[in-house]
Amino acid sequence: MQFQQCKLPHHAFYEKLRKTGLLELVQFNLSDACAETYSLNELQSLFEEDELCKDAPLTYANIQGDPSLRQSISDFHGQENPDHYVTFCGAQEALFTCMAALLKAGDEVITLTPAYPPLLQTPLLFGAQVQSIPLTAENHWKIPIEEIEKSITKRTKLIIVNQPHNPTGSMIEKREIERLWSCVENSNRYLIADEVSVHTTFNTKPVDSLYRSLPNIIGVGVSSKSLGLAGIRIGWLMVSNEHLREKVLDIKSYLSICCSRIDEHYLKHALLHSKKILARNNQLVSENINLFSNCCDRLSDQIQWHPPKAGLLSLVAINQEKQADRFSETLIQEAGIMLLPAHYLGLPGNYFRIGLGKKAFKDHLPNFERVLAQH
């Protein structure tokens, strides 16, 4: 296998900051894609004494994932069969392994821009061709299902969609989800439903899942986004197709082989307390959306945005004479705030990714406003 591209665009941004010394000046990442995290002590304080892992053997774990953890993940998603789940060392390994199992040279992949870069780049590693469908601010970042339908050809092997969308925070409604399912049912096409922040919602209505137990649909989840437990390096695939699941496990045996037994233990018990964790994190996101909405009102001549419908992320357009990268550098130099230009996510222009999940968001927002006002 010959990898055709290696460097992910957003990693190139961080590498540029490292080489110029700016990364050392960063005090807060305003583009962080994760919810507020817990310290190990804070997480353990939620557990009962017998839920701590003092006696856990430090041996290899089950390659598919600990059965009791898979049951907890299945319950977390409201699904019925824990045997459909496979755990990985993060969602990126899960996505890589899934695409390696599905794609070959000449296949076509339909995805959206802007996007989490691996969704655009990883198919290229396997010789597939990527057709990206652009979302627009004018259309409030709405995902155009009709464009996905029109883009399907006899070579289309995979459709990749977020719910909610990363990084715009837009959502696909139930009737449109059914149209997506129809795109892959009774065909040799597959749908990857990347739902790593599906549990981040700011109202009483849950986000409708794209996943269902059909052979052609694969779900993706992770501990780092809605739960904010990025230090627990576990992601997972939901794969009801037994043949595909076995192929995924074969490929995983060449990669991490298995997850950390300690990580599995902590995630299993964190999921038992997920309602408390999500309630805190979702409240923070809601408060930060209100804070940023007020900021945008005060600076309406400089900032335009559409608040997210769900998830941890949104995009903001900033009217600046400086190029996006130069403005990001200025923001670090003058306020210690890092802001990711959206052209690294496939969206040209002066757009930036805003992360809304952190408790310190409110502390750094005044400095963000100050720099905007000065420039």
Image: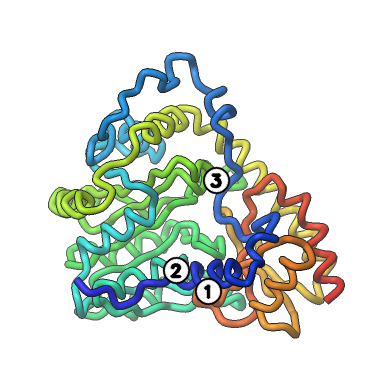
**In this picture, is 134 found above or below 223?**
below
Marks 2,1: beta carbons within 8 A: yes
Nearer to the camera, 130 or 163: 130
Badge 2 amino acid: Pro
Q: CA distance from mark 1 to mark 3?
A: 32 Å
**Residue 313 occupies which quadrant of the picture?**
bottom right
> Image quarter for residue 342?
bottom right
Tell me if label 1 and label 3 are in contact, CB under 8 Å.
no
- Give how far across and how far down residue 208 sits, in percent: 45, 51
Q: Secondary structure at mark 2?
A: helix
Residue occupying the point 78% across, 50% down = 363
Q: Nearer the viewer, mark 1 or mark 3?
A: 1
Front position among marks 3 and 2: 2
Task: Report x, y in % for residue 209.
Answer: 41, 51
Q: Which numbered dot is residue 205? A: 3
Residue 122 left/right relative to 342? left
Q: Which residue is mark 2?
A: 117
The amino acid type of the residue labelled 1 equals: Tyr
Residue 271 horizontal side relative to residue 84, left or right: right
Tag 3 secondary structure? loop
Q: Residue furthest top?
A: 49
Q: Earlier in the sequence, mark 2 or mark 1?
A: 2
Query: For residue 297, what is the image quadrant?
Result: bottom right
Q: Amino acid at mark 3?
A: Lys
Q: Which label's residue is closer to the chain start, 1 or 3?
A: 3
Of 283 and 102, the residue lying toward us: 102
Residue 75 visible to the viewer: yes
Residue 197 in the image: state x and y as whole percent.
49, 51
The mark that comes first in sequence, 3 or 2, is 2
The one of 292 and 141 positioned closer to us in this rendering: 292
Residue displayed at 61% across by 82% down: 349
Residue tagged 1: 344
